[in-house]
Amino acid sequence: MIDPTARVAPTARLAPDVEVGPYAVIGPQVQIGPGCVIGPHTLITGNTRIGRNNHIFQFGSIGEIPQDKKYHPGDDSRLEIGDGNTIREFCTINTGTAGGGGVTRIGDDNWLMAYVHIAHDCIIGNHTIFANSSSLAGHVLVEDHVILGGFALVHQFCALGAHSFLAVSSVVLKDVPPFVMAEGNSARPRGINAEGMRRRGFSNADLAAIRGAYKTLYRSGLRLQDALAVLDGEADCEHLASLASFIRQSRRGIIR
């Protein structure tokens, strides 16, 4: 299952059924689980652990050292990738830094299109979609079911809440709350991601509650703390509770 032109370090740990294409290079600290396919000319290096049933297409650079001047050779720095991910051509994913927790982590069932860049210390959940050439700076949090349009850019230390959506070429400088669609440079709120949530099984009642919360946050004229107090009064809706919790935990502040 390993092409004779590939270079696999003797200490790398690959499950018996892993496929490795021509001229791929796999470093000595790499672990790759069952069912994975590694495309031609792909480099996988560093302290990198890859789970089951991932497909990494040709010319990717996975597990290379961070693009961070504070990084020093020998720092505790690793990359963890879960199960069922698709990583298309020319994607670059860096390991973490000692100052940022030491790990870049990608969850399960994510779809990274061509030329996506995931910088050091990013944490990505499950079922996300990164369209072509979208990029994350360091220390970005991306929760479950987030979609980034092509060429979208996210500033370091920002967070994208679950089920949020970034339009093409958006530039995110502050946190995007759960369920919100954002667009522009810098990104502004443009409504809720109703269609995406409907496809994932959100009920009409859920959507009505989330739409009402969006109006409270963005159209009521209330200060943020006053808007949060209104959301607290809707504590019987778990989605609004998670929305309020995300906003309160925001380090950079939310887009408004």
Image: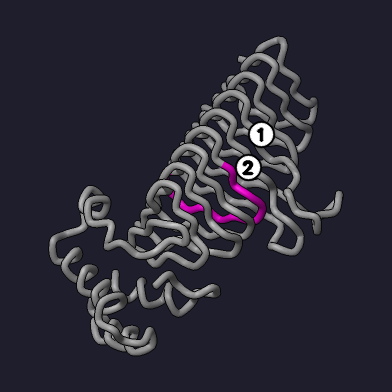
Q: Is residue 127 magenta?
A: yes
> Farthest left residue?
204
The image quadrant that residue 121 belongs to is bottom right
**Label 1 SS:** strand
Say the numbered circle drawn on residue 87.
none
- Magenta stretch: give its range: 117-129
186 above or below 195?
below
Marks 2 and 1 sit apart, C-alpha to C-alpha, by 6 Å
The image quadrant that residue 94 belongs to is top right
Q: Residue at x 69, y 29 (%)?
A: 43
Q: Position of residue 195 (x, y in %)?
A: 22, 51
Pick whichever of labels 2 and 1 is earlier in the sequence. Answer: 1
Residue 52 is left or right of residue 189, and the answer is right
> Which amino acid lies under the numbered mark 1 shown in the image of this protein?
Ser
Q: Position of residue 223 (x, y in %)?
A: 36, 87
Q: Is residue 214 magenta?
A: no
Q: Residue at x 59, y 64 (%)?
A: 157
Quadrant position of the C terminus in the picture: bottom left
| Residue designated by label 2 | 93
Q: Residue at x 72, y 40 (%)?
A: 64
